[in-house]
Amino acid sequence: MPDTRHRNNRLAAVISETGWTHTEVAAAYVRVALENGASQFASVSRSHVSKWVAGHAPSGRGPDYLREALSRKLARTLTAHEIGLGAAPSPQRAGPDWSTDTLSALTDLGRLDVDLDRRSALGAAAYSVASLALPASSWWSQMADRGAGRRAPGSRAVGRGDLEAVRDMTSMFSRIDQKHGGGHARTAVVQYFTSDVVSLLHGRFAADAIRRAMFSAAAELAYLAGWMAFDNSEHATAQRYFTGSVKLAAEADDPPMAAHVLRAMAHQAVDLGHPQKALDLAAASVDGRRYTLASPRERSLLGVVHARALAATGDTARATAALLRAEDDLRAASEGDAEPGRVFFFKEAGLAHETACTLRDSGNPDGALSHFRRSVRTRQATSFKRTHAVTLGYYGDVLAQQGRIEEACATWGRALDVMDGVHSGRARQTAVRMRSALSPYRQRGVRAVRETDARAAAFLSDAA
């Protein structure tokens, strides 16, 4: 039977506009797919792209990954129709939409996230670089006005006791995340948000200060759902929660809360290899009232992620200056300060971890090793198992890059010890990096290499 497919001229024209070869398109596609945890597409090659141009359609969520890859190259948002794949469904908007109703969007997202039959479609969406675009400066005041003028459709009276209950629940879930990882209990977080908290946001507030504080508390809970998704490598889902959290913080007229989320978005963008976007987000997090109204501890957290973004873009001098300011800010913090509960985790060990990452990315491995050691030494490991495992993993990576493979194995062994009971995509990536770094040494008969590699493989098998 003859092949009756028609050549996809739209796709061919877009690829021609990028200036890429089919091999380069395939590489960009694979990067987006792996970024979103779709390892089944890792083998996509030039021949696949040629078939798509000839009229075949990418399988599964492939059209979304292809659209995102091409959009990044052309620095504009492409639709599925523009690449000749208009019939392909897309569960995610092509770009940022800061005008939609905050509560409706988050409620819909939450219901999709807890529905196991539909969550796969949400998780298969592509992390969108276009959606990292920040709203106009006037948007912030407009959202504050929207919040002040929001009508309460419900009859429930909401007071300070309700606010404290939401804060207590968020604190509990935050500590669970820090100890057990983002892959544990996120469904409970989302269910609590969509059932209890959304109904409170629709209630009648005793005072406008209570309304603003409740919207801020809800922003923190939405942020936590996003952070847990990010930690579990569900990046598109995390991105949508982060956007919703920023909108809630803006309605609460809470600049430091918005800064906290923008900092998380910058962290995610750095990790996924989008340094300029990360810098835009990090710079916004330390801009104006977002920085000046924050507590010293939070200013330090914002500043050190700004330093990481600067290092990622190659601006070592400004990264160094940002690190020094972050150190000064943390030094100014006191355990007795009135500060938001969301920064409870950020102490000397957290600053040392982020400083080490900044120095590593600035080409200073010796400085990075020193600060990774300091982070490991000063962290309360039993309460912060997930981050402790990630720190040990990074520490071992730098040792391995310096050829100190037995020291790296000893450090990774400690990381694997800590990972027991941790459900985290970042922890899984630590084990993946271990195996990759150890592959050149597997045939050399080094006992430490053999044992560490076997333990990492077992961890990945159990976590699958």
Image (cartoon, rainbow, N blue to C red):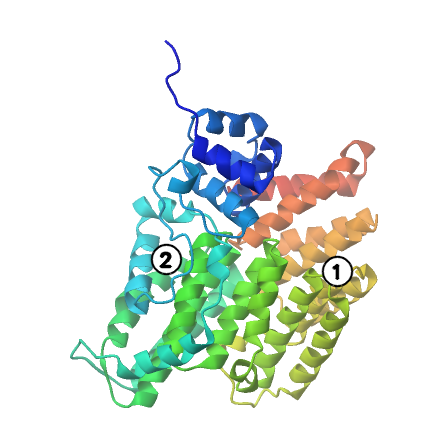
Work out whether mark 2 precedes mark 1 in sequence or the reverse, and give the earlier one: 2
Left or right? Give the position of 242 relative to 74.
left
- Residue 360 numbered mark, or none: 1
Q: Is residue 141 above or below residue 97?
A: below
- Which kind of residue does numbered mark 2 sit on? Thr
Left or right? Give the position of 333 relative to 102.
right
| Residue corresponding to mark 2 | 187
Left or right? Give the position of 414 relative to 44.
right
Label 2: element kind: helix
Residue pictured at 57% horizontal, 59% vertical: 269
Q: In the rendered image, is residue 58 in sight?
A: no
Left or right? Give the position of 173 relative to 39.
left
Residue pictured at 26% horizontal, 79% vertical: 150
Label 2, residues with CA under 10 Å away: few <14, some 14-19, many ≥20:
some
- Residue 420 numbered mark, or none: none
* Image quadrant where one finds the N terminus: top left
Q: In the rendered image, is residue 26 in sight?
A: yes
